[in-house]
Image (tube, rainbow, N blue to C red):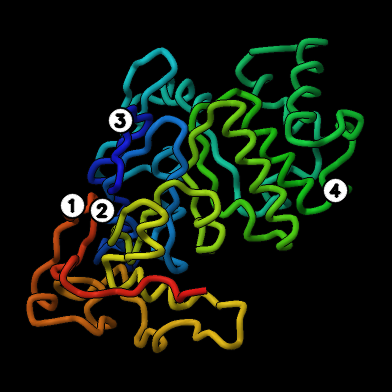
Amino acid sequence: MVAEPTNEILSVDGLKVHFPITTGLMNKTIGYVKAVDDVNFKIGVGETLGIVGESGCGKTTTGRAILRAIDPTDGKVLFRMKNGDVVDTASISNNLLDRVRQEMQIVFQDPFASLNPRLTVFDIVADPLKVNNIAKGQELEDIVSEMLRTVGLSPELSRRYPHAFSGGQRQRIGLARSLIMNPRLVIADEPVSALDVSVQAQILNLMQDLQEDLGLTYLFISHDLSVVQYICHRVAVMYVGKLVELSDTEEIFTSPKHPYTQALLDSVPVPNPKISSGQATLEGEIADPSNPPRGCYFHPRCAFAKDICKTEDPPFKMLDNGSYSRCHFAGEIDLPGVAAS
């Protein structure tokens, strides 16, 4: 049974991000790219919710719209602050948004491109404290040193520049910068995809330890299902700007309720030559978000599609087991999940 979060820290309701397509000297709008199209989910305090899907499905845009690094076209993003106030980050003023961002941070995918090569590690990590006038002098030095120790780096390295560090160390620096303001919610945008596999495990274990020690909540964006299975409590599957399934991690992997989720699971390599890696390869191309097909966006690639799928967009509905699925035949079709090990 899927457990809905009882103590919500974030509630996303009807989130849309549409980018205009313009042409001519007058930049006339002739259409929109629906990067995020009516996304709904909730995250509980201390939970890790994963968002997975193919490249270009809208995962990163969703995360940045929550932070308001990208302005949403429509919808609400309700965030519960430390003082108990609930604010809609999609519509609040810039002054209040600055306060909210102290409690909501992001870890970027590329640990090198996201760090200023002209600043030392100390300056990178200390910058949020300086900008918000929270600490200075020896107090600033002490806070930064303690945060570097927390993420597994020696404070003696704080006067070095990012190029002197490995990829895993740079991602630790990025984590330190994100956590220096003691946020409640961290949006991790593919934080280990640019790292070697052995280093990925170290960073994931560190993130789990930090979550327990600091009481963090994660929105974990990834295309790597093995990573999501390891770190996430629940998983949301995204296709062409829409959530097509949301369920507990175990339920997603053992009993998916949407054909696209099954296709993602089938694409994961199995480290055993005697075991099939899944069903037939998913045919067709991912739908164009600027001109999606009528009805269910997935129907041109779906082996279970019927006439209703070509004309009616299925609702994102709750099933008997508590999972959510955007499929007309969710619960009726039998999907095997991951291959037996």
Left or right, 2 with respect to 280, comes to left
Is tag 3's residue or tag 4's residue first in the polypeptide sequence? 3
Disc 3 and disc 4 in contact, CB within 8 angstroms: no
Q: Which residue is mark 4?
A: 165
Where does residue 171 sit, x and y in percent of width and height?
71, 46
Disc 1 and disc 2 in contact, CB within 8 angstroms: yes
Residue 80 appears in view: yes
- Estimate how packed mark 1 is, as few (under 14), some (14 to 19) or many (20 or more) residues with alpha carbons within 10 Å: some
Is tag 1's residue or tag 4's residue first in the polypeptide sequence? 4
Q: Residue shown at 16%/71% (left/top)?
A: 332
- Considering the numbered disc 4 on the image, is that residue within a helix, a strand or a loop? loop
Which amino acid type corresponds to the residue marked 2 in the rendered image? Ser
Q: Residue shown at 33%/53% (left/top)?
A: 247
Residue 73 appears in view: no
- Considering the numbered disc 3 on the image, is that residue within a helix, a strand or a loop? loop
Q: Which mark is residue 318?
A: 1
Is tag 1's residue or tag 3's residue first in the polypeptide sequence? 3
Is tag 1's residue or tag 2's residue first in the polypeptide sequence? 1
